[in-house]
Amino acid sequence: MKIKANLIANGISCLSLIFLISFTVMAEDSHERKKYFIDSYLEAEHFFYSGEYEKSQLSYQNYLSGQPSKDRSNRALYRLGEIHQKSKTFATALRYYEMVMQRSPVLILAEDAKLGQAQCLFELEQYGAAENIFKEIAFSHPDDKKKWQAKIYLGRLDEKR
């Protein structure tokens, strides 16, 4: 009987120890996640790549309301343009893309924003302005994939007319 009681006591203390260790690990994991999201830009990027666009939009706007760095703020504006384009609010997306192009006219990000701008103009049925930008992209964008996207849109413009 003493052996049984000893086994039960040892089992309970062992289970208690396992519980305490796992609780500590869970608390540390939670702390690490919160530490990761101290930076609202990283939080926004996480939500964006997770497909949680509403949360990422709020996080990007929160980031921009603070004192953002120039590179990250340009990326945040571009992402906001992408989010609005995905949600089919093309006029708002167009404004964000224009901000990116005004702030960083020589970066690859500005070239990508130009493609987004042209796509939004196309969706807003402003075909003349879209065509001019697509032609420029088709000949000058450094990324061949983006050049092909522009050429595809140019073909779609021919169908619209």
Image: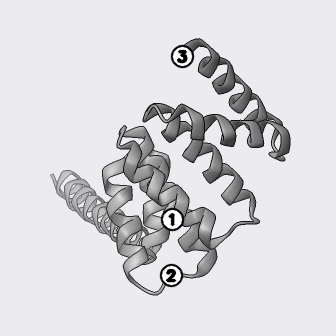
Under mark 2, the amino acid is Pro
Question: Residue 24 location, x and y as percent?
Answer: 35, 71
Number of numbered discs overlaid on the protein picture: 3
Mark 3 or mark 1, earlier in chain: 1
Residue at figure coordinates x 30%, y 68% from the top left: 20
Taking the image as drawn, is residue 105 in sight?
Answer: yes
Residue at figure coordinates x 77%, y 35% from the top left: 147
Under mark 1, the amino acid is Ala
Look at mark 2 in the image and give the residue it sits on. 68
Gap in Å between the C-alphas at discs 2 and 3?
Answer: 42 Å
Gap in Å between the C-alphas at discs 3 and 1?
Answer: 33 Å
Gap in Å between the C-alphas at discs 2 and 1?
Answer: 9 Å
Q: Residues within 10 Å of mark 3 (few under 14, many from 20)?
A: few
Q: Nearer the viewer, mark 2 or mark 3?
A: 3
Mark 2 or mark 3, earlier in chain: 2
Look at mark 3 in the image and give the residue it sits on. 160
Asked whether 17 or 160 is in front, the reply is 160
Quadrant where the C terminus is found in the figure: top right
Under mark 3, the amino acid is Lys
Mark 2 or mark 1, earlier in chain: 2
Q: Label 2, secondary structure: give it.
A: loop
Q: Is residue 111 above or below residue 67?
A: above
Q: Residues within 10 Å of mark 1 (few under 14, many from 20)?
A: many
Is residue 90 rendered to the left or right of residue 102?
left
Q: Is residue 151 above or below residue 141?
A: above
Coloration of the structure image: one colour
Question: Residue 93 location, x and y as percent?
Answer: 44, 50
Q: Label 1, secondary structure: give it.
A: helix
Q: Label 3, secondary structure: give it.
A: helix
